[in-house]
Image (spheres, rainbow, N blue to C red):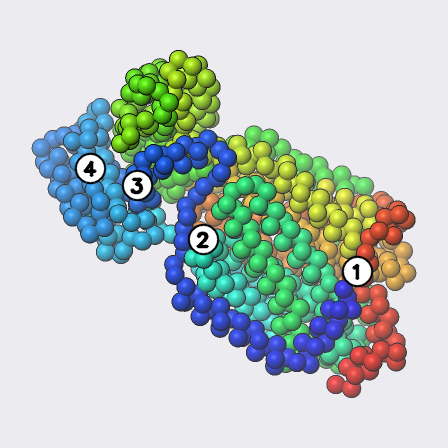
């Protein structure tokens, strides 16, 4: 591996113009493809194998066209204090607004609340449902402006008017500010780390090129592969973070080799052969973690994982080819001025902050280990009360019209009105479908926790009925989950009495089913991802205990970060500081996201830090000396890489979307804990306690495992003795 990458780096340095032109051509080609490609074919959210999805599929089959994904807007009218919407002037204002909304070119229908009996019992609140002919993504600006204009005209009459529904969605995703904040902080970190504008700018430039290639490719393939508009969010987030980090490690190793007197071409080749090997294996662990998201069985999550994995692959290729090409263009620009002079002696580079910290840990490994494990364990404790759900409009800021509409409906019609359950009755084998549906409706309506049941609506064949059930509790309330379980638990008895069957669906039931499926998939996912990564690390480090230690350290950091998410977003401690106005269940996909992404990133730091220790150990240093050497060469760069990751992820905390805010906070806290507590404290403490045993590998396993020479032992020998290495002789003449 190291020898092959050495040749790749040397070739990229020598043929730098060709490499740069190839990447420019790739960027232009995928960019042109993205511009000409049709819009994203958003297939909507689906999860095979759960009851709510089966019920939805049955509705599509028995009610063709009725479940089309046309956008909807629920307009809520609230009368001023002490007044009623049924008063003559308010009623006229509501009816005029609904009539105006119905005139839109993309509007299919706008239901008058007084005809649909959509008025609260106290007469203070009413709502009108506007249905559009097209999906939310296809609504024109004119249709959105018409809706906003109608709402404002109604407000001018003295009514409080707000609206929710898919028609109000702004497309979600990151709006650009988060990326700019992350890049700006990353630039500062790189400048402090390298002390050179060129050295700081090169990782940023190559990372942005990689993200450009990845995002353009996703856009170009979005229609053909059925990728949604949100698929690229994770790819952008990870592509930017790992792209900067991977280039950072190669440039850092190049500067080290140049400071030791290597010629530019030889230093580049050695940097790609050694640091590049670590980049390859670190990238592989991230790809394994992201591709493993397919285990969960959620198509959208699988596509997001594969798209992000593709972005990581591009980042690796950029680091191995474009970075050395740029080093060929500017071989001295990335160096500090003091490093452009004569070669430093080994003593001059011996002590730095990394070595001082390593010696501190090596002198007192047990207290450091205990403190780190106990601290992470304490942070992980709140995770035991983790509640999963899919936050909706109730999680949005009160400044949004969707949140105000949600609150108005909850106050006027009850908290469960925002999350009705949909019951689909399949009476295909029943002689009297109407009687069966009526019996099922009556039995479900008698269940404790049900406020109301709507009249059943039959399909044309008369063998399938649909009716809505309004719970007494909010959609994210644990009591609502218990209610859904109770309704489904009554099914065997009701089916035996009526001869018909039924299933429960709707957004609330779907979210409950998603949470349960994700929880059940978490353990198999961990087994697959951690198992594959342990095998990969066995090959890289040729050690039995190092991979096991890496996996256990990851579990500690990811559980602690989940506990931090629970503390802020579920329990509300410090939520105001992050702009979180409403706390509640944690997004169902959050644990899977966190486990998958953080595992890959955690292994990044493990590979980069441990590969230098392994390199020193292979070259004859004692286990303690190897730890110190690893920290001397890698600690500064690992800290910089972690700070960049944290900056990129923390930038997303400023987004208004609560789910993106939660993901950004979770990832930033996980990287913080994993890099600074696990990798920088627990890892050296464990290695100090294990001594030479840390690098032990059974002889039978040593014979089976392939040798990849990730530490670049052959390269280092060749570089130290240039005469037998033609490549080194040629590089010295450049």
The reply to whether residue 338 is in sight is: no
Determine contact: label 4, label 2, CB under 8 Å. no
The reply to whether residue 19 is in sight is: yes
Quadrant in the rendering for residue 76 = top left
The residue labelled by disc 1 is 708
Residue at the image position 61 percent from the left and 57 percent from the top:
643
Outermost residue, bottom direction? 733
Q: What is the secondary structure assignment of the residue under circle 4?
A: loop
Q: Which mark is residue 287?
A: none
* Label 3 neighbour load within 10 Å: few <14, some 14-19, many 20+: few
Closer to the N terminus: mark 1 or mark 3? 3
* Label 1 neighbour load within 10 Å: few <14, some 14-19, many 20+: some
Q: What is the secondary structure assignment of the residue under circle 1?
A: loop
Which tag is nearer the camera, tag 2 or tag 1? 2
Q: What is the secondary structure assignment of the residue under circle 2?
A: loop
The residue labelled by disc 2 is 226
Horizontal side of 442 relative to 324 (left or right) equals left
The residue labelled by disc 3 is 65
Which tag is nearer the camera, tag 1 or tag 3? 3
The residue labelled by disc 4 is 111
User: Where's the C terminus, which quadrant?
Assistant: bottom right
Closer to the N terminus: mark 4 or mark 2? 4
* Label 4 neighbour load within 10 Å: few <14, some 14-19, many 20+: some
Q: How far apart are marks 4 and 2 (CA)?
A: 33 Å
Closer to the N terminus: mark 4 or mark 1? 4
| Residue 105 rendering spot, x and y as whole percentages | 20, 52
| Residue 549 rendering spot, x and y as whole percentages | 76, 44
Horizontal side of 349 relative to 215 (left or right) equals right
């Amino acid at each position: 591996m190291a020898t092959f990458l050495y040749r790749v780096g040397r070739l990229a340095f020598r043929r730098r113009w060709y490499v740069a032109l190839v990447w420019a051509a790739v960027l232009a080609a995928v960019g042109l493809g993205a511009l000409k490609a049709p819009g994203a074919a958003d297939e909507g959210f689906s999860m095979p194998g759960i009851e709510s999805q089966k019920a939805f599929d049955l509705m599509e089959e028995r009610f063709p066209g009725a479940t089309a994904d046309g956008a909807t807007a629920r307009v809520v009218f609230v009368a001023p204090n002490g007044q009623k919407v049924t008063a003559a002037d308010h009623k006229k204002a509501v009816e005029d607004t609904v009539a105006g909304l119905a005139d839109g070119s993309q509007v299919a229908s706008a239901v008058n609340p007084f005809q649909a009996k959509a008025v609260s019992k106290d007469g203070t609140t009413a709502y009108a449902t506007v249905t559009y002919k097209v999906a939310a993504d296809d609504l024109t600006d004119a249709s959105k402006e018409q809706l906003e204009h109608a709402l404002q005209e109604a407000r001018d009459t003295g009514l409080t008017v707000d609206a929710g529904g898919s028609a109000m969605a702004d497309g979600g995703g990151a709006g650009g500010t988060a990326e700019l904040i992350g890049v700006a902080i990353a630039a500062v970190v790189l400048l402090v780390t390298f002390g050179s504008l060129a050295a700081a700018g090169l990782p940023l430039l190559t990372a942005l090129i990689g993200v450009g290639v990845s995002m353009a490719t996703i856009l170009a393939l979005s229609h053909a592969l059925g990728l949604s508009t949100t698929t690229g969010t994770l790819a952008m987030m990870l592509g930017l973070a790992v792209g900067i980090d991977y280039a950072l490690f190669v440039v850092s190793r190049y500067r080290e080799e140049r400071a030791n007197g290597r010629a530019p071409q030889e230093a580049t080749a050695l940097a790609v052969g050694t640091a590049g090997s670590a980049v390859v294996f670190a990238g592989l662990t991230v790809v394994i973690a992201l591709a493993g998201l397919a285990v969960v069985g959620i198509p959208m999550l699988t596509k997001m994982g594969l798209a992000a994995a593709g972005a990581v692959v591009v980042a690796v290729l950029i680091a191995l080819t474009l970075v050395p090409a740029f080093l060929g263009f500017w071989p001295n620009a990335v160096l500090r001025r003091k490093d452009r002079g004569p070669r430093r002696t080994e003593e001059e580079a011996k002590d730095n902050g990394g070595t001082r910290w390593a010696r501190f840990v090596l002198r007192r490994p047990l207290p450091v280990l205990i403190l780190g494990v106990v601290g992470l364990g304490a942070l992980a404790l709140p995770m035991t009360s983790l509640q999963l759900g899919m936050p909706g409009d109730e999680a949005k800021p009160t400044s949004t019209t969707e949140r105000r509409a949600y609150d108005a409906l909850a106050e006027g019609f009850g908290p469960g009105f925002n999350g009705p359950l949909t019951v689909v009755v399949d009476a295909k084998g029943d002689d009297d479908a109407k009687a069966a549906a009526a019996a099922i409706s009556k039995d479900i309506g008698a269940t404790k926790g049900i406020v109301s049941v709507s009249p059943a609506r039959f399909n044309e064949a008369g063998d399938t009925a649909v009716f809505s059930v309004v719970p007494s509790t909010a959609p994210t309330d644990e009591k609502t989950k218990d209610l859904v379980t109770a309704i489904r638990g009554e099914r065997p008895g009701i089916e035996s009495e009526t001869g018909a069957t039924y299933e429960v669906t709707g957004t609330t039931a779907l979210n409950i089913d998603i949470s349960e499926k994700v929880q059940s998939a978490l353990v198999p996912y961990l087994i697959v991802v951690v198992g594959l990564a342990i095998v990969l690390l066995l090959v890289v480090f040729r050690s039995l205990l190092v991979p096991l230690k890496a996996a256990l350290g990851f579990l500690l950091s990811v559980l602690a970060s989940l506990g931090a998410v629970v503390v802020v977003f579920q329990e509300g401690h410090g939520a105001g500081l992050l702009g979180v106005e409403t706390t509640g269940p944690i997004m169902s996909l959050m644990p899977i996201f966190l486990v998958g992404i953080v595992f890959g990133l955690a292994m990044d730091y493990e590979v980069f830090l441990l590969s230098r220790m392994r390199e020193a150990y292979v070259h004859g240093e004692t286990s303690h000396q190897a730890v110190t050497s690893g920290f001397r060469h890698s600690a500064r760069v690992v800290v910089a890489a972690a700070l960049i990751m944290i900056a990129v992820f923390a930038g997303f905390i400023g987004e208004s979307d609560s789910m993106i805010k939660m993901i950004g906070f979770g990832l930033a806290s996980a990287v913080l804990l994993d890099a600074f507590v696990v990798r920088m404290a627990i890892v050296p403490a464990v290695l100090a306690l294990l001594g030479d045993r840390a690098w032990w590998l059974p002889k039978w396993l040593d014979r089976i495992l392939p040798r990849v020479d990730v530490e670049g032992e052959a390269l280092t020998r060749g570089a130290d003795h240039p005469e037998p290495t033609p490549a080194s002789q040629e590089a010295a003449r450049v």
